[in-house]
Amino acid sequence: YQVHPPKIKRRAFLGFLCVAVHLVRELHLGNVNVLLLWCVVVALEAMLEERDITAGLLLGLTFFVKPYLLLCVVPMVVLRRTAVLGWALVAVIIGLALPMLIEGPATGWSLNGSWVAAMRAHGDYLTSTNTLRSLLSTLVGRDLPARWDLLFIATAGVLVAAVTWLNGRKDRSQALILGLSVALACVPLLVVTDVQHFLLALPLILWVLAQLFRWRSPLRAVVFTLAMLAYGTDSTDLWGSDLAARFEQVGLVGWGTLLLLLTAILAPHLPSRAS
């Protein structure tokens, strides 16, 4: 873990290819996922350098804009980064207080209420075939009730906590990196949202690529390639309208992300040899 993986430019280019379809869609729609991902990555770098205030404020801004990213709190709880969590809470409180300070208490409270209502309605006017509930519904041949989402969220929280704790016994920095990366990749599998939100899996993709460049493992490479073919080719330009619609219907991006998570979590246990 202490040796930097080789060929950083090649890894960066491969990572870009993996997320190119999602990135193009993200930029076309003018969404903020790239900015939020930047905030999390910079916050992670700040935590590795023990700059807790910067890390906490950036994470707090991220949680304020999209609260479902709170899954990223789990690794910090496991690793007891309480100062970071405290400053994140400060940033969220500031974000909630600003409308009241600018517009007055009554109007500010109403604006905050409308904002919460808008987030709750997010799943009412959007559909996603890539969530865990949708993927499992496809497997069993019937729609599962929405309450299953709570089970999936709890399971993801336990998974992120376990990955962080197990890796933290060897290297706390690597545990933080992997824990946050797994948490980010899990988010679009848990909530109904636009498919470009799967761009959040980029840190985990780069982490797996680093392992592939550090260790020679044909099995890892094959599994990762299959995962990226499913994850990163959601485009009518690549498959044509009919075939792309079929892939979307079965949640191909979601299956690819699940395979990516499996590859990342099991990578240390697969046969390999140092390069």
Image (cartoon, helix red, strand yellow):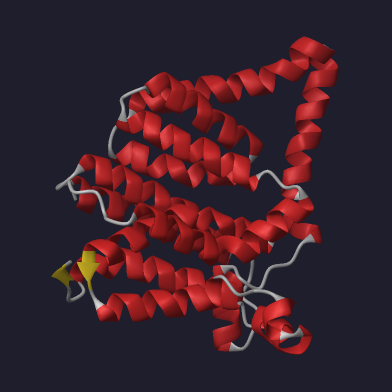
- Image coordinates of residue 215 in percent, x first then y, are 21, 66
Q: Give the image quarter of residue 261.
A: bottom left
Q: Going 47% across and 46% down the picture, which residue do you hit?
A: 71
- Image quadrant containing the C terminus: bottom left
Q: In this view, does 18 lie to the left or right of 134?
A: left
In the visual, does 60 lie left or right of 268? Answer: right
Confirm whether residue 191 shows in the render.
Answer: no
Q: Which residue is rendered at x = 37% and y = 79% of the image?
A: 223
Coordinates of residue 150 in the picture (x, y in percent): 53, 58
> Which residue is found at the position 64% from the left and 65% from the top?
21
Above or below residue 167? Residue 53 is above
- Up-down relation of residue 27 to residue 173 (above or below): below
The reply, left or right, for residue 93 in relation to residue 71 is: right
Position of residue 272 measured from the top left corner of the image (x, y, whole percent): 17, 73
Q: In which quarter of the image is residue 98?
A: top right
* Left or right of 117, for residue 188: left
Number of marks: 0
Q: Where is residue 65 in the image (x, y as percent from the top left)?
A: 65, 36
Residue 172 in view in this figure: yes
